[in-house]
Structures are given as structure tokens and as C-alpha cells.
Image (cartoon, rainbow, N blue to C red):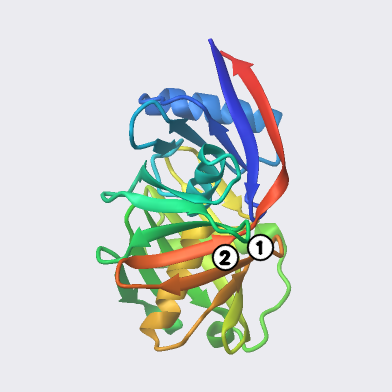
Amino acid sequence: MDYHYTIISPGGNTTAILHSEIEDRFLRKKIGNSIMSIHKEVEQVGFLSTNKKIPILTMAGGEFCGNATRAASYIILGGKPGEVLMKVSGMNSLVTAGIMDSGEAYVTIPTDECALIELQNGDMLVRMQGIAHVIVDETINNNAPEERTEMEYKNKALNILKQYQLNDEPAIGVMFVSPLSNYSCSIVPIVYVRDAGTFFYETACGSGTMATYLSFTKKNLKMKSIVQPSGAEFHVDQNTYGVRIAGPIFPGLVHSAITL
């Protein structure tokens, strides 16, 4: 059978969006692995159904993914300004996503079911629907964070997850955060998704950006923009409904198909 997909880069977080709904999680993983073996730059795979009134996006591991949601809205809207209501894996509530007049793609999620738990050494666990993140403030744990390789970041993240007994979570990230100014910071996202079998140093992380923002808000600190490893700047704000991130969709869509 042929499976058609689009490769799109929301803020550098290269994502494959398959244009089919696949309910079998084992088949989703098989398709995801096949796509990532062909396209080494792809960090995650989502499955998009637009056959019903409300589009449905299901990630390969069943997790919530902010960037894939932004990417899916960009595909649905054809890159033009607008908004779409979506059902996204991992989320109990519907989410809104779309494109601003500026061209930035955004996603808004409700935060009433998010839990923020203070850990040791200034770390914080942010439990969201569909994924959790440990926020590590590098200025607290390292006065001047040393340069680390990708493998060193991954090993450090694994140690943190083991320390807090979170290494069996279905989807979890560790965000290494370094403030850049009073209202801006940068993150290094390390994300593990159990059922997808992926463990990435991500070039950008939407849900991790949201979790970082919520962590800073919990500490009564304002954060308006969060810079990703790709260099993309995500803008963050919050209203009575929830938290919204907005950021660029990098140009260069790729349309292809695989046969399984």
C-alpha cells in the first residue's frame, strides 16, 4: 500500500505528516521508522486525517506534539492565514492552531489540566496532557554551563530522568534552559517517546517551549520568547484559555510516498 506524506519544518523540528489516519500503533511505528530511515533529518512522524469535520492528528507514539500540530495546521490551511480546531493525540480537549498574518504558525492548548511539581535543585516537572517535561534551569545548576556534545546532553537527560524515576514515562522531555535576557531564554530539548522508539536532541520543541514558559510563570518570571537550537524564536503568551506558542515554518516542503 502507498502512504503519502509531506515533510515540513516547524521551527527546524523537521516533521513528516502522513496523509492518512492509522489507528494501529504498531503500524504507525513501522511507517514512522521507514520514513525516518529514508529521511534522516526527520525527528517525528504524525498521521493526519481530514476526512471529518474536525481534523485528527495522531503522532507515531500517541504523544502530544506542539510543532507537529503547528505543521498540520499549516498543511490544512495551505500556508494561508486562518485557524483550525483539531483533535490531537495525547490531548483530552480540542486545540486551536493556525497561521497569523505574519506567517507564523501557532497552537494554543488549555492549561487547566497541567500540573507543575517542584523537584530538587530548582528543577521542575511540568505534566501536560500527552507529554511531560523536566525543566532544568542551567543558571541554577551550573553558574556557567559548559559546552556539551549531543551525546553528553542525552546522557545528562537520562541521568535526570533516572534520578526522578521518570525514565518509564510514555513521552517525556528534559529542557535545558539558559536565560538570554529578562524576557527571553534558550532551550536544549532532549525528548523520549516510548512507543515511537525515539530519543532525540531536537532542533526545536513546541510542547517543551510551553512547559518552559509555564515553569517560569510558576516562579513569577515573565518569558516572552524562547530560542530553539535551530535558532528559531518561538513567541509565547497566555490567556484565560491556555498557553500559545507561535513560530516560523521553514520553507521547503517535500511531498513523497512509501510502499509497505
| Residue 160 seen in the figure | no
Q: Residue at x 56, y 39 (%)?
A: 75
Secondary structure type for disc 2? helix
Spot the residue most to the top.
Answer: 1
**Looking at the image, which residue is at 69% across and 59% down?**
150
> Can you say whether 27 is above or below 239 in the image?
above
Q: Position of residue 54 (x, y in %)?
A: 34, 37
Mark on residue 224?
none
Q: Is residue 242 above or below residue 99?
A: below
Question: What is the x, y in percent for residue 164?
Answer: 38, 67
Question: Which residue occupies 50% across, 39% down?
Answer: 197
- Residue density around tag 1, few if under 14, some if 14–19, many if 20 or more, within 10 Å: few
The answer to whether 225 appears left or right of 195 in the picture is: right
Instruction: Determine which residue is flagged by label 2.
Output: 156
Q: Which quadrant of the rendered structure holds the C terminus? A: top right
Q: How many marks?
A: 2
Q: Disc 1 residue type? A: Glu
Q: Residue at x 39, y 40 (%)?
A: 62
Residue 103 is situated, as x and y percent measured from the top left of the image, at 63, 56
Q: Residues within 10 Å of mark 2 (few under 14, many from 20)?
A: some
Residue nearest the observer in this picture, 123 or 216: 216
Residue 195 image point, x, y percent: 42, 38
Label at residue 152: 1
What amino acid is found at the position of numbered circle 2 in the picture?
A: Lys
Drawn side of residue 122 relative to residue 103, left or right: left
Rendered image quadrant of residue 216 = bottom left
Q: CA distance from mark 2 to mark 1?
A: 6 Å
